[in-house]
Image (tube, helix red, strand yellow):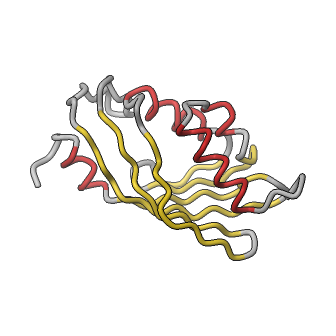
């Protein structure tokens, strides 16, 4: 880590920047070789994370990641939280745009990040896809 920042500080900065809507600053926390795992998109490597975050922030401009608990063990940081948002703009997906539903979402998540040399090199997020789709009104519960 650089400048005395701990892994927890770097990961916390990512959430603060995302919540402020500064996606450029948020993705600056990530390594160019970032390895990402997400239930909806699978596993990816490289600099695709900005597009991923832009897509969600564009469709749900009020989205916020509310950090509940944070655990740090060496270079690994685990965050439990809630993702709150309103689906107010079309959401771009590989299968086409999802029309805005106007639905509010309050979705629990857990993220596991690994930090090396001052950058997040691995970001694994876990959330309930069915719960997300149900809250958006795209599936019945």
Q: Position of residue 8 (x, y in %)?
A: 69, 62
**Quadrant of the frame with the N terminus:** bottom right
Residue 49 higher or lower than 88, as above or below: below
Residue 94 occupies which quadrant of the picture? top left
- Quarter of the image with the C terminus in it: bottom left
| Of residues 37 and 95, the one drawn nearer to the viewer in this rendering | 37
Look at 72% across and 56% down and name the residue there: 9
| Place of residue 54 in the rendered image (x, y in percent of width and height, measured from the top left) | 52, 30
Q: Residue at x 47, y 62 (%)?
A: 68
Question: Which residue is found at the position 64% from the left and 46% from the top?
Answer: 14
Rendered view: 79 above or below 44: below
88 to 116, vertically: above or below = above
In the rendered view, does 62 fall on the left or right side of 86?
right
- Residue 40 pos. (x, y %): 39, 50
Name the residue rendered at 31%, 26% in the picture. 97
Residue that lies at the very extreme toward the left in this rendered image:
140
Q: Is residue 140 left or right of residue 53?
A: left
- Total marks shown come to 0
List the single residue furthest toward the bottom.
Answer: 73
Give x and y (percent) for residue 87: 29, 32
- Identify the image quadrant of residue 91: top left
């Amino acid at each position: 880590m650089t400048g005395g920042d701990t892994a927890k500080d770097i990961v916390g900065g990512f959430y603060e920047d995302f919540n402020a809507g500064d996606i450029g600053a948020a993705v600056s926390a990530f390594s160019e070789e970032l390895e990402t795992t997400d239930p909806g998109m699978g596993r990816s490597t490289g600099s695709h994370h900005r597009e991923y975050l832009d897509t969600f922030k564009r469709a749900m401009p009020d989205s916020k990641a509310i950090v509940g608990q944070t655990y740090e063990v060496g270079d690994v940081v685990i965050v439990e939280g809630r993702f709150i948002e309103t689906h107010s703009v079309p959401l771009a997906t590989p299968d086409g745009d999802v029309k805005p539903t106007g639905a509010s979402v309050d979705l629990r998540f857990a993220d596991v990040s690994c930090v090396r040399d001052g950058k997040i090199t691995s970001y694994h997020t876990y959330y309930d896809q069915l719960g997300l789709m149900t809250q958006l009104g795209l599936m019945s519960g």
